[in-house]
């Protein structure tokens, strides 16, 4: 059974102090969410996060971890995730742009290939989150296709993001089907006219197909994210998305 989660990047502005972070976790739990992804917050100690999660009846199922921490203190990152009980360690963005220093595709393979293997050896899974740049072609293949081929299933999963797939010209449901078996956690955000992010059900993505393909592909966690709430309260946006999914029998 897939579970609904909140991607805390949605409410990042209120998570820049420990006090605000703690209050935001409480507000998310009060909506009914029982899982979260931690991303875009202030620095925190792993023990502090575990305490706050336990206090609110929440589980952290995925993070987006800063690249510098992955490359320079990976042992500590893995140990921290063990403390707060999270098995998915994610990278939120990569340019795949050879004109930017250290951002070529080959560099990604070299650097994150070894990181992914070490995370796997620790019994966790490295997760890569797409934007739209993965839908450009390198040597005749989409970057996302190359990533599927160059990283073994055991080394890397994909936090497929419905909005960014559509922004890149892809079909979110079709890509969930292509990535079946590699999508334990995905991001749900709707796509509205004008390339705007929207509350689920208030845009144009066919989420009936998305949910069908996600479940068939082995997705465990549906993480609601809205990077831009267009001046609305992010917690209210998360609430409306939760209600949309709850009406479809998810919790």
Image (spheres, grey):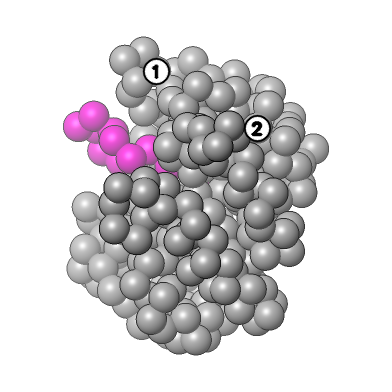
x, y (%) of residue 75? Answer: 50, 86
Instruction: Kindly report the secondary structure that dominates the magenta region of the rendered protein.
Output: loop
Label 1 CA crowd tier, 10 Å (few <14, some 14–19, many 20+):
some
Magenta residue span: 220-234
Helix, strand, or loop for circle 1?
A: strand
x, y (%) of residue 204? Answer: 49, 15
Q: Is residue 166 above or below residue 80?
A: above
Name which residue lies at 37% across and 75% down: 69
Q: Which residue is mark 2?
A: 175
Farthest front residue in view: 139
Displayed quadrant of residue 52: bottom left
Q: Nearer the viewer, residue 168 or 13?
A: 168
Helix, strand, or loop for circle 2?
A: helix
Can residue 38 be seen in this snapshot? Answer: no
Task: Answer left or right for 79 relative to 174.
Answer: left
Mark 1 and mark 2 lie on one chain; the one further toward the N terminus is 2
Numbered tag placed on residue 192 in the rendering: 1
How many angstroms separate mark 1 from mark 2 (CA)?
Answer: 19 Å
Numbered tag placed on residue 217 in the rendering: none
Label 2 CA crowd tier, 10 Å (few <14, some 14–19, many 20+):
some
Task: Answer left or right for 39 relative to 134.
Answer: left
Can residue 131 be seen in this snapshot? Answer: yes
Do the CB atoms of the residues marked 1 and 2 lie less than 8 Å apart? no
Magenta region includes residue 225: yes
x, y (%) of residue 87? Answer: 61, 70
Name which residue lies at 50% across and 22% down: 169
Q: Is residue 20 above or below residue 221?
A: below
């Amino acid at each position: 059974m897939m579970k609904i989660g909140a991607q805390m990047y949605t409410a990042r502005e209120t998570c820049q102090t420990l006090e605000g972070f703690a209050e935001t976790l409480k507000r998310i739990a009060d909506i009914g969410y029982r899982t979260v992804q931690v991303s875009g917050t202030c620095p925190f100690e792993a023990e502090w996060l575990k305490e706050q999660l336990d206090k609110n009846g929440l589980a952290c199922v995925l993070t987006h971890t800063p690249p510098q921490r992955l490359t320079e203190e990976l042992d500590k990152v893995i140990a921290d995730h063990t403390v707060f009980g999270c098995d998915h360690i994610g990278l939120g963005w990569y340019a795949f742009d050879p004109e930017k220093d250290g951002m070529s595709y080959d560099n990604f393979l070299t650097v994150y290939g070894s990181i992914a293997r070490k995370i796997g050896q620790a019994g966790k899974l490295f997760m890569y989150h797409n934007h739209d740049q993965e839908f450009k072609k390198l040597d005749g293949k989409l970057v996302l296709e190359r990533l599927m081929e160059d990283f073994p299933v055991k080394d890397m999963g994909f936090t497929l993001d419905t909005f960014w797939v559509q922004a890149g010209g892809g079909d979110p449901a079709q890509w969930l089907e292509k990535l079946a078996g590699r999508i334990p956690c995905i991001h749900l955000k709707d796509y509205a006219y004008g390339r705007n992010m929207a509350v689920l059900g208030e845009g144009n993505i066919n989420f009936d197909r998305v949910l069908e393909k996600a479940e068939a592909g082995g997705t465990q966690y549906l993480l609601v994210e809205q990077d831009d709430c267009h001046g609305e309260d992010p917690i209210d946006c998360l609430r409306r998305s939760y209600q949309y999914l709850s009406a479809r029998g998810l919790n």
